[in-house]
Amino acid sequence: MAKPVIWIPRHLSDATLERARRDYDVILKQEDTPGTAQEIIEMSAQADGMIPCHSEHFTADVAGRLDPRLKIIANHSVGTDHCDLNALKARGITVTNTPDVLNDATAELAVMLMLNAARRAVEGDRIVRTGAWDSWSPAFMVGKQVTGARLGIVGMGGVGRALARKARGFDMAVHYHNRHRLPTEAEMGAIYHKTLDDLLEVSDFLSLNCPATPETTGMMTSERLARMPRGSILVNAARGALVDEDALLDAIEAGHLAGAGLDCFVTEPGGNPAFAKHENIVMMPHAGSATRKTRDAMGFRALDNLDAFFDGHAPKDAL
Ligand code: 8YV
């Protein structure tokens, strides 16, 4: 029997491509650049399935123009804000994601951003690297202590819970806001706040770990940032759309926030050039899940979903 044909627009890990080629007829996009709307539409007539990343946008318009040949979009991401799920569902297309497998890598990056912003790593690195380190005093490079501080987590899904576990290693008092309170045994001692506004007031560090939805888009407004304690630090390893970037810039420039750690931006790739002059804003180029181990796990999870689908079963991560 002929193997199903799948289109892989981005260059996934070697182990993922090797397994994909064993079980499928793979069409791999030559250039490792985002698949355009036109390419997605064209490839839908040649492929039964696809493994896109968050860089391929399945808008309602694209969904409406897909060829009926395409049956499954097995995303290589936990986030699905690049997909209009309703429009794809209306076309009868199965959509899956890759939850769980990237929790530790993404939470690890959030810890890194938190520590780097708190202990002024960008500035410190620049001082040593450029030979500008010519004196020392007890007041030099004084930062904010993470150990024992209060960490507010917005969104206690897989990444939020992994972050809460890691924060315990720093004796942090973990507080959280989530649409629903977790069962006590899953809270790991974290304190639930019914409203985001209440959480903000007790967060020396605030980490955003929720998806971008119509409800959460732009939720970190200037009013919300003002609710955070003076000298607090914002970390975002979720989605840039959660934050009003102009408001964040104002809060940094006014000294209300001591810093920020950002892995996500409203504009990607590229980021926000206005942040570049502030060394207390630590930035990464959307690399939360970018470890070898996690890339393999994400690729395998997407392939598990495809395998189940083409074997006639409901994929584990069908949305
Ligand atoms: C990925 C992500 O970098 O999973 C997500 O939602 O944003 C990231 O893990 C990306 O989609 C990799 O394919």
Image: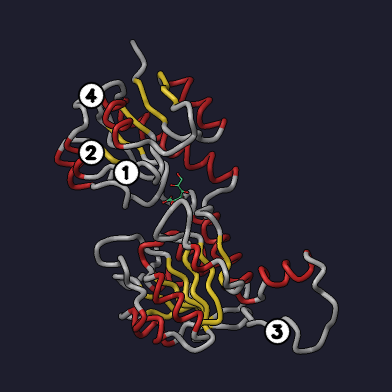
What is the distance, in whole Å, between disc 1 and disc 3 at their CAs? 43 Å
**Marks 2 and 1 close (CB-CB < 8 Å):** yes
User: For this view, does 136 lie left or right of residue 245?
Assistant: right
Q: CA distance from mark 2 to mark 4?
A: 14 Å
Numbered label attached to residue 142: 3
Q: Do tag 3 and tag 4 residues touch (Cβ < 8 Å)?
A: no
Residue drawn at 41 percent across, 37 percent down: 302
- Residue 305, given in percent of the width and then of the height, sits at 36, 36
The picture places residue 214, in percent across and down from the top left corner, at 24, 62
Residue under label 4:
69
Point out the image quarter for the N terminus.
top left
Residue visible at 31% across and 80% down in the picture: 195
For marks 2 and 3, the one nearer the N-term is: 2
Check if mark 2's residue and mark 4's residue have beta carbons within 8 Å.
Answer: no
- Residue at 52 percent of width and 51 percent of height: 289
Residue type marked 1? His
Depth check: 109 or 137 in front? 137
Q: Which residue is mark 1?
A: 57
Percent position of residue 92, x then y: 17, 35
Q: From mark 1 to mark 4, how far is it between C-alphas?
A: 18 Å
The 10 Å Cα crowd at callout 4, few under 14, some 14 to 19, many 20 or more, is some
Around disc 3, counting alpha carbons within 10 Å, would you say few (fewer than 14), some (14 to 19), or many (20 or more)? few
